[in-house]
Image: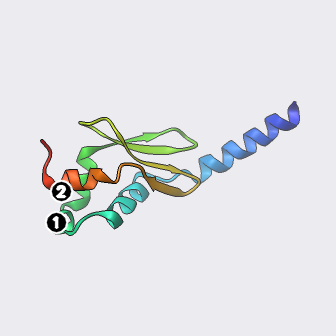
């Protein structure tokens, strides 16, 4: 039992160390963003004002403030874009 607890603590420590910050989430979104959204200088500010960052210590996520949907999820230094339609929805203008 002690062996499993030690392994769990080691895995949790590794996940905590490699937990991606908000900047990595924004970078992943900017790679997939359409040109219409990236034309202005305030692209990152526009994304920041429409997202809430959630830190779970071993993983992190961003969610949309209006639709309350998970946009990105990150763990072990990698960020996965869950809601790929969110960027096109943001570029068209929020209702």
**In front: 42, or 93?**
93
Image coords of residue 17 (percent x, y): 61, 51
Residue 89 percent coordinates (x, y): 21, 50
Position above or below: 3 against 17: above
In the rendered view, does 6 fall on the left or right side of 59? right
Question: For the point 79% across and 42% down, which residue is it?
Answer: 7
Q: Are marks 1 and 2 in contact (CB under 8 Å)?
A: yes
* Quadrant that contains the C terminus: top left
Residue 58 sits in quarter: top right
Residue 5 lies in what quarter of the image? top right
Q: Residues within 10 Å of mark 1 (few under 14, many from 20)?
A: few
Give the residue pinned by disc 1: 36
The residue that label 2 is drawn on is 91
Q: Is residue 31 left or right of residue 80?
A: left
Q: Quadrant of the N terminus?
A: top right
Q: Residue at x 22, y 61 (%)?
A: 43
């Amino acid at each position: 039992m002690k062996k499993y607890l030690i392994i769990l603590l080691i895995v949790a420590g590794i996940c905590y160390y490699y937990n991606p910050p908000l900047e990595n989430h924004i970078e992943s979104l900017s790679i997939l963003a359409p040109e219409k959204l990236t034309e202005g200088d305030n692209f990152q500010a526009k994304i920041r004002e429409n997202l809430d960052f959630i830190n779970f210590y071993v993983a992190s996520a961003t969610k949309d403030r209006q639709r309350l949907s998970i946009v990105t999820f990150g763990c072990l230094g990698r960020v996965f874009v869950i809601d790929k339609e969110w960027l096109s929805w943001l570029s068209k203008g929020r209702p």
